[in-house]
Amino acid sequence: MRFIFIYICLFSTAVAQIPNDYCKQVNNIAAVERMNHERLMLPASGETGASNNFDIKYIKAEWQVDPSVRYINGKVTLYFKIITATNTISLDLMNDLVVDSIKQRNATLVNQHTNNIIQINFSNSIAAGTLDSINIFYQGVPPTTGFGAFVQTTHATTPVIWTLSEPYGSRDWWPCKNGLDDKADSLDVFITGPSQYTAASNGLLQSETITGSQKITHWKHRYPIATYLVCFAITNYAVFNNSVQLGAVSLPMQTFCYPENLALFMTNTPLVLNAMQLYNNTFGEYPFIKEKYGHVQFGWGGGQEHQTSTFIVTPNEGLMAHELAHQWFGDKITCGSWQDIWLNEGFATHIASMYYERNYPANILISRKNEIANITALPGGSVWVDDTTNVNRIFDGRLSYSKGSHLLYMLRWIIGDSVFFKGLRQYQKDEKVIYSFARTADLQRNLEQVSGRDLNYFFKEWFYGQGYPSYNIVWNQLGSNYVRVKMNQVTSHPSVPFYELPVALEFKNATMQKTVILNNKFNGEYFFENIGFIADTVLVDPDYWLITRNNTSVKETDNITGQNVISIFPNPVQDQLYMYFANFNLPAASINIYNAAGQLVYKKQLSVNGSEFLEVFVKNLSRGIYIVRIQSGTDIKYSRKIVKD
């Protein structure tokens, strides 16, 4: 872990230079985030034990801390709406922390705090639809095992405390609903600490009030927020402000950094301003436009997209672009299960790549190529997370980050950029998921509505399925202009026997090139294309839109040239039979197909003068042996036996 952390820090010192490979940065972001989450993971730990019979509306959190001491004293006020009539609700809180009391309108409630769950008993049953509130008073030393979501350490000998709760760590330091099913509608945070320190949190700074040796800092946030995105940090921060123009709004950009890193942060954080404008224009208005966006430095190796207040270790351009993208994909719309973490991390990775492609276009192909190499380094693995108790699996850089990102490249390739981005803008306006939670099916639904296409096959093969295809292209030249192509595919994992994809083939020689797109629907499929020249080379997916590996192309030597030559393929045939006439003069003729009994089952008139290509649809013919004849009157010009599968 230390090696990766140092690598990122070294890389960040060169962010003013043009990065030669954003893929390396993505791999490091994912690796460090995954390894740190894994290091802090409590082995047998569930997502949440909180009850689902109430909906949190508002949180008022009052925390007293001293950055030199690992300890928290808290009062958390929860306003909630009862969903089903009940006399009890449950919250998540680690047993390491002591619940002093829980009150409802100054009346102390009975509670049991066992197995990291607080069960709160009301004196009377509360009816469904009732708005109510409780105050929870607690204190203690947050656990160092578990998720390590509450960190007390030093920087340059100065003490610091920060929080980082993704995926399951919120309950390490405050009573909450620890799952992905309930966002508080709004939040106020009051942090009390020694007056020489500065505290950062979500939303807008309201006040800093010094009373004796203590400072109370009030942060106000008025957007729905997932539990794991609630945060605070406190140390001797240096603070500076910037802004970015988003339409008619001048959005505040606020940075909290360690004083020893002030010059670096002041130099590098403005790099994110262009990314903010790009994302705002591409995906819709910045989701927290009435508040701010900012960075808070912490010592964890990577970044964390706390809502309106991203925590970062260093102002690396790629890291900042990645974490900013989460404000749309992760914060405004949060994955509704860790099975769908790609809706957060795959999107942020892809959008940061999009930012890099816009600013450093010379590096597009090498970055895509390296991302594909990383994804296909192993034969299996799905984007869908099959084990959400394993943080290493949730934050798998190869699958959740890189493969998730490249699924979006493939969707762009399949439905086109204009439709794809229109679909994402609709997704960002979808009332079912905005400022709430989404599953992959919600994304699919929006893309299908905008594109008018059924994408179920794609998500079945690429989101749930494992592996990737390898293509073997067998082709030959037909005369001076045409090529015949047979597309063969093998897959790296048995979960997907065949991947249905449009595949780009680039035909070229020393002076000419042409790219054709073949919509490959089954293995061994034949295609016929007019490329307009004699090619000597074929490249598969030259712009690296698709997740593939070990592709090959073989040119057959039986080039069809000369006068009066007819070629028929494929044989055996399934749905379509292709005929190529090379330099043929046949003004009046017909294509006749006879079954094994000699009966005429197909006839089509044709006239050929030169080189032409014809398609004959034989899907409706029964399986068996047939004779294909080209006849001019009674003169048989060509005859061949074919097999219909």
Image (cartoon, rainbow, N blue to C red):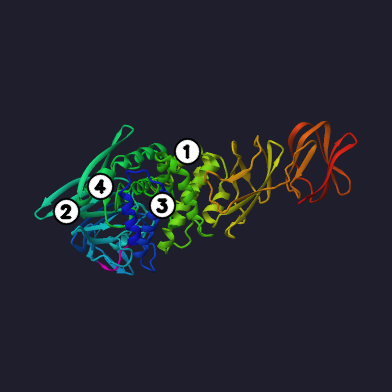
70 within the magenta span = no
Q: Which residue is mark 4?
A: 264
Q: Quadrant of residue 279?
A: top left
Q: Residue drawn at (26%, 46%), measured in percent from left and top?
A: 265
**Numbered label attached to residue 197:** 2
Q: Given this view, does label 1 or label 4 mark the residue nearer the observer? A: 4
Q: Earlier in the sequence, mark 4 or mark 2?
A: 2
Separation of residues labelled 3 and 1 (CA atoms) = 29 Å
Name the secondary structure under disc 3. Answer: helix
Q: Earlier in the sequence, mark 1 or mark 2?
A: 2
Q: Are marks 1 and 2 in contact (CB under 8 Å)?
A: no
Q: Given this view, does label 1 or label 2 mark the residue nearer the observer? A: 2
* Position of 117 relative to 62 (above/below): below
Q: Given this view, does label 2 or label 3 mark the residue nearer the observer? A: 3
Tag 1: amino acid: Lys
Q: Position of residue 126 (x, y in %)?
A: 33, 58
Separation of residues labelled 1 and 2 (CA atoms) = 45 Å
Name the secondary structure under disc 4. Answer: helix
Which residue of the protein is positioned furthest toward the left in this rendering?
212
Q: Which residue is mark 3?
A: 24
Tag 2: amino acid: Tyr
